[in-house]
Amino acid sequence: MRHCVIPAAGLGTRFLPATKALPKELLPVLDRPVLQWGVEEAVAAGLDTMVVVLSRGKELLAAHFDSAPELERTLESRGKLVGLEAVRRSQRLARFAYVYQPEPLGLGHAVLQARPVVGDRAFACLLPDDLSWAERPILAQLVDAHREVGTPVLALMRVPRERISRYGSVAVAESRGRLHRVTAMVEKPAPEDAPSELAIMGRYVLTTPVFDALATTPPGVGGEIQLTDGIAAALAAGPIWGLEFEGELLDVGTPEGWLQALLRTAPSHPTFGPALREALERGLHQGALP
């Protein structure tokens, strides 16, 4: 497995006006944009080719990982060697392919646009809005599970039933520790209709039958072609498993989640950690914080 499909065609309306000209995937979490955090997780899982799904007007995402000779020369001439290495590192992380979603027809439709690049091979899918923290990268855990069962594997997390309507939910049968065989899926069910408290999170390992199913999946919730619906249809072609991963995922696709991610990552950062502690102490001392 080499490919990781990264859907990045959304408009980022919850961050307007900040995302009017800047794709939300380039909003920084400390010193790296959201998209780069996801790419680094995929690379750590052993994947070397990122297939990024764009919409028109989001070409800046490609520019972030392209070479920047003029910037590099300027940084080098000014002795900004730390910044120079950071720029060069982002350029050599992985190979990139870019495909376009011509219309905003949903996550499932976006993933389907990657098929000409991926072909008939198993592939990973990572939603960049979900930032992860784990001793072993969450996507790597899914790749390991796929090697064990040989089928699609979904990232699962238990959530309170009153929050399950934000996610896809699964019904499960056979279990092998944290691995569960999925028997049914429902996209964003009402709490009383959810088959379980196991929610599908933004990490997947998928196979050709999922592409086949997405090609004929009708619009679902919100009038869009849902990835969950396509995966559910692929159950007819063979088993699908879900993994209760070890680690934490945080949705940075909302301003509240993005702020939480900053507070989650800053304390351990060698530069930003001390600055955050100093700012908090100063705020408490001045009575600016409750």
Image (tube, rainbow, N blue to C red):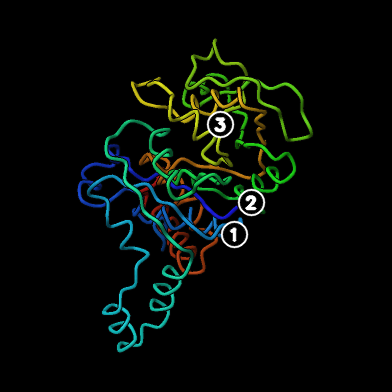
Question: Picture coordinates of residue 76 (x, y %)?
Answer: 34, 86
> Which quadrant would the C terminus be assigned to in this image?
top left
Q: Residues within 10 Å of mark 3 (few under 14, many from 20)?
A: many
Q: Position of residue 28 (x, y in %)?
A: 37, 56
Q: What amino acid type is highlighted by mark number 2?
A: Ala
Query: Mark 1 and mark 3 in contact (Cβ < 8 Å)?
Result: no
Q: Which residue is mark 2?
A: 140
Q: Secondary structure at mark 2?
A: helix
Q: Amino acid at mark 1?
A: Ala
Q: Which residue is painted at 44% across and 59% down in the image?
A: 276
Q: Quadrant of residue 185?
A: top right
| Crowding at mark 2 (Cα within 10 Å: few <14, some 14-19, many 20+) | many
User: Residue 123 got which mark?
Assistant: none
Q: Secondary structure at mark 1?
A: helix
Of the numbered discs 2 and 3, the one sitting upstream in the chain is 2
Disc with the residue nearer the chain's start (3 vs 1): 1
Q: Are marks 2 and 3 in contact (CB under 8 Å)?
A: no
Q: Nearer the viewer, residue 154 or 103?
A: 103
42 up-or-down from 241: above or below: below
x 30%, y 84%: residue: 73
Mark earlier in primary sequence (2, 1)? 1
Mark 2 vs 1: CB contact within 8 A: yes
Identity of the amino acid at label 3?
Ile
The residue at which mark 3 appears reads as 200
Give the spatial CA distance, label 2 vs label 3.
16 Å
Give the residue number, with chain letter if any, for mark 1. Answer: 44
